[in-house]
Amino acid sequence: MRIDHVALWTRDIERLRAFYETHFGAVAGPRYVNAATQFESYFLKFESGARLEIMSKPTVHPRAASTAAERAGYAHLAMALGSRERVLEMTARLAAAGYAVLDGPRVTGDGYFESVVQDPDGNRIELTV
């Protein structure tokens, strides 16, 4: 058994697609549109084979104002970058592009080297080795 993909709702599917393509090298498959339900989605594939589905619909509610607070449910998407240097570089690159850095880079109590940033919708992304 394996997890096939993770899915995220968004109010701006093209902005989120461009973010993951630009910063994480994702490759978007064809855009799926269901005109009857006004649902649209992309499957984004990463070099490792992992997939992220981003989905949009006019009825998607905006995220609550406090996206930095922990809450039940989805916590973060972890991206293993391969080295401390790449974690530092990616964190700096995303910060320079205007994305929020919520934590780190740092060594956690259990030995991980990581930082936590937010994508354009406020979803947490853990950048780790």
Image: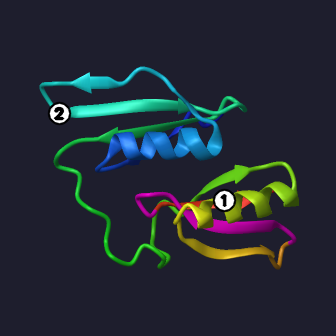
Is 18 situated above or below 67? above
Residue beneath the point at 15% across and 24% down:
35
Which residue is at the far top?
Answer: 30
Mark toward the start of the polypeptide (2 vs 1): 2
User: Which amino acid, by three-letter code, is at mark 2?
Assistant: Gln
> In which quadrant of the rendered view does residue 122 lie?
bottom left
> Based on the displayed image, in which of its 4 quarters is residue 128 positioned?
bottom right
Residue 73 coordinates in the image, percent (x, y): 46, 63
- The region drawn magenta spans 111-122
SS at mark 1 in the image: helix
Answer above or below: position of 23 versus 96. Answer: above
Residue drawn at (72%, 32%) of the image:
48
Along the viewing direction, whichever of 12 and 97 lies nearer the viewer: 97
Q: CA distance from mark 2 to mark 1?
A: 35 Å
Up/down of 5 relative to 35, above or below? below
Q: Is residue 59 magenta?
A: no
Please name the colour scheme applied to the rendered image. Answer: rainbow
Q: Is residue 118 magenta?
A: yes
Residue 38's disc is 2
User: Which dot marks residue 93?
Assistant: 1
Q: Which quadrant: the C terminus?
A: bottom right
Q: Nearer the viewer, residue 91 or 106?
A: 91
Is residue 7 something one can see in this rendering? Answer: no
